[in-house]
Image: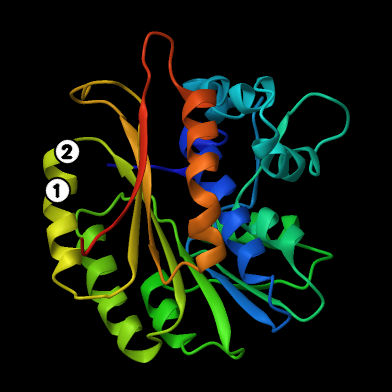
């Protein structure tokens, strides 16, 4: 599956991913100690929802536009992050994870971004100009391991690949195992698309065999039944989520389910420990 950010900016997966990412970082920031935030597949950092690639799919109408139309105050932090890159009431621009993470930085925190594709890396540097972010142009999995343990006692690694390589899941699994050996207490967030349940079930079994004690799985299925051959939703694996985050998660997930459910479908969004 080839999932390039620019074609899918602002879709339902972005709404869930960025809502949870904001909640996760804010939960960690309840303690004053510095955080290092690392985004291994940063993309361009900012996307034009009126541009050709986003308009070709039109997925933002079922994502960010639904989130802005929903009155639930639990989505306010997400809406504020999107609104921060726009002027006026309409949402023409969509912030990728780099811009959202930059908004969350405190003076003591660090942000490290990586994008391997030269054109995207060039765009990312322009988008992040004026922030304190460091931008790298390296293999994502090499950088992931090279940056561990982080320079601060606590940190978050965000892994958000396009899944354009057939071995993407295998590389994530192997790198996560090595990363956990180097940085067992660190927080890692791995995003993944859900296209068919069989593929996902096999990968889930492989990750379960890693024996990571605290591995939370959040899954958002858009439709009430699997729709063969199309995008069905997305999920996040979160290693070592903080207690404050997991305690606040159920009402946020329900708010996201309601806001994003396609017409005629209830949808499903769940959070379970992988080891259970």
Q: Which element is circle 2 on?
A: helix
Q: Is 48 drawn above or below residue 106 in the view shown?
A: above
Q: Is residue 160 left or right of residue 71?
A: left
The residue sitting at 61% across, 70% down in the picture is 28
Question: Which residue, as the protein is rendered here, is positioned at the far top?
Answer: 264
Q: Is 1 drawn above or below residue 12 in the view shown?
A: below
Is 183 in front, or is 243? 243
Question: Which residue, as the protein is rendered here, is positioned at the far right?
Answer: 88
Looking at the figure, which quarter contains the N terminus?
top left
Q: In the rendering, which numbered label is found on residue 111?
A: none
Q: Which element is circle 1 on?
A: helix
How crowded pointer 2 is (Cα within 10 Å; few <14, some 14-19, many 20+) is rated as few
The residue sitting at 28% across, 84% down in the picture is 178
The residue sitting at 48% across, 40% down in the picture is 253
Instruction: Give how far apart the Cα atoms at labels 1 and 2 are.
Output: 6 Å
Q: Position of residue 80 (x, y in %)?
A: 76, 41
**Residue tagged by mark 2?**
197
Q: Position of residue 10 (x, y in %)?
A: 57, 34
**Residue tagged by mark 1?**
201
Q: Is 97 drawn above or below residue 220 in the view shown?
A: below
The residue sitting at 65% across, 37% down in the picture is 75
């Amino acid at each position: 599956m080839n999932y390039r950010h620019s074609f899918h900016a602002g879709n339902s997966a972005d709404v869930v991913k960025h809502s949870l990412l904001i909640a996760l970082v804010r939960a960690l920031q309840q303690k004053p100690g510095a955080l290092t935030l690392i985004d291994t597949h940063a993309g361009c950092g900012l996307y034009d929802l009126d541009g050709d690639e986003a308009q070709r799919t039109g997925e933002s109408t079922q994502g960010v536009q639904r989130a802005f139309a929903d009155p639930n105050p639990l989505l306010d932090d997400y809406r504020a992050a999107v609104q921060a890159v726009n002027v006026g009431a309409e949402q023409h621009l969509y912030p990728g994870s780099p811009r959202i993470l930059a908004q969350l930085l405190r003076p003591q925190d660090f942000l490290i971004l990586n994008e391997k594709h030269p054109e995207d890396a060039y765009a990312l540097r322009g988008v992040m100009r004026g922030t304190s972010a460091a931008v790298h142009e390296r293999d994502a999995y090499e950088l992931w391991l090279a940056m561990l343990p982080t320079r601060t006692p606590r940190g978050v690694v965000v892994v958000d690949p396009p899944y354009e390589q057939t071995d993407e899941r295998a590389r994530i699994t192997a790198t996560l195992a090595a990363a956990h050996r180097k940085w067992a207490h660190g927080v890692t967030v791995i995003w993944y698309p859900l296209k068919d349940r069989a593929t996902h079930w096999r990968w889930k079994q492989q990750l379960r065999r890693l024996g990571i004690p605290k591995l939370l799985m959040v899954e958002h299925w858009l439709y009430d039944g699997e729709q063969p051959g199309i995008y069905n939703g997305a999920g996040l694996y979160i290693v070592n989520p903080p207690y404050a985050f997991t305690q606040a998660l159920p009402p946020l997930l329900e708010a996201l389910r309601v806001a994003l459910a396609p017409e005629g479908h209830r949808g499903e969004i769940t959070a379970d420990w992988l080891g259970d």
